[in-house]
Image (spheres, grey):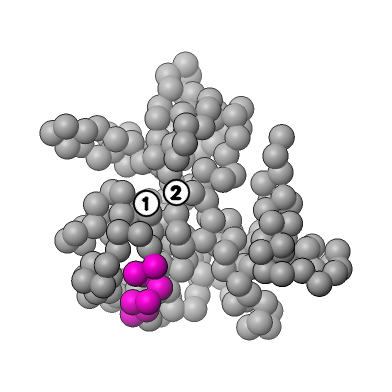
Amino acid sequence: MIGMLRGKVWEIQGERLVMDVQGTGYLLTVPYGLLAKAHPGQELVVYTHVVMREDDLSLYGFSSFEEKQLFLQMLGVSGIGPKAAISLLSTFGAVQIESAIASENLNLLTKVPGIGKKTAQRLILELKERFRGRGSVPVGGSSYSEPPAVIHSEVVETLLALGFGLDEAKQALNQVQTDGGELTTEEQVKKALRLLAPIN
């Protein structure tokens, strides 16, 4: 079983990327946050999981071991397949998913395409005990003292959903705000993304 790959991004194909590992190309389905940061030639370490079915053999990749573990936990819930689990991670990211499950936030979970009310309820029922106490704490459990307005900023939440870390998201937001000017949330996100994932 393939648990991890280290190599270079060869190319990006729609919602998947090809990694060159010592001359072998691995096609991986990954969350959007990882895809958005990847570019050809980039060195990557990706945690992987193979899904084997009668008519399909697919490889899924994740930017952290914790993200992979959440993916596997969601696969253990009845009605959640690999596509739905990746869709959840692509839409909100691990931090927000765990928070939504812990706080039983049906409205947030059902915003994901393909996740209906019953599926969201099963996620909450089967996983909420595992994430108890994580409703407002980022993965890793690090403490911080910034005002709640910054922590819960829509810009930071959007960047977290795209797979960026809390620290880098806050640093990018601080830089955007330091540049001055009255910007909408969308404009701030775009500027932050240019700082975090510059196009080469």
What's the amino acid at mark 1? Ile
Indicate the secondary structure of the residue bearing disc 2: loop
Tell me the residue at 81%/72% (across/down).
Answer: 182
Q: Is residue 103 left or right of residue 119?
A: right
Range of residues picked out in magenta: 104-111
Of callouts 2 and 1, which one flags the residue occurring earlier in the amino acid sequence? 2
Q: Is residue 122 magenta?
A: no
Q: Are marks 2 and 1 in contact (CB under 8 Å)?
A: yes
Percent position of residue 64, x then y:
46, 50
Q: Is residue 33 left or right of residue 200?
A: left
Q: Nearer the viewer, residue 23 or 110?
A: 110
Q: Nearer the viewer, residue 7 or 85?
A: 85
> Which dot marks residue 31?
2
What's the amino acid at mark 2? Pro
What is the quadrant of residue 174 in the picture?
A: bottom right
Q: Quadrant of the N terminus?
A: top left
Q: Quadrant of the C terminus?
A: top right
Distance from disc 2 to disc 1, alpha carbons, whole Å, reads 6 Å
Q: Is residue 156 above or below residue 7?
A: below
> Does residue 113 appear in the picture of this structure?
yes
> Which dot marks residue 86?
1
Percent position of residue 193, x then y:
67, 53
Q: Is residue 109 magenta?
A: yes
Tell me the residue at 13%/33% (across/down).
Answer: 54
Indicate the secondary structure of the residue bearing disc 1: helix
Q: Residue furthest left?
A: 54
> Which dot marks residue 20?
none
Percent position of residue 155, x then y:
64, 68
Q: Is residue 167 above or below residue 131?
A: above
> Does residue 70 appear in the picture of this structure?
no
Q: Is residue 80 left or right of residue 2?
A: left
What is the quadrant of residue 44 in the picture?
A: top right
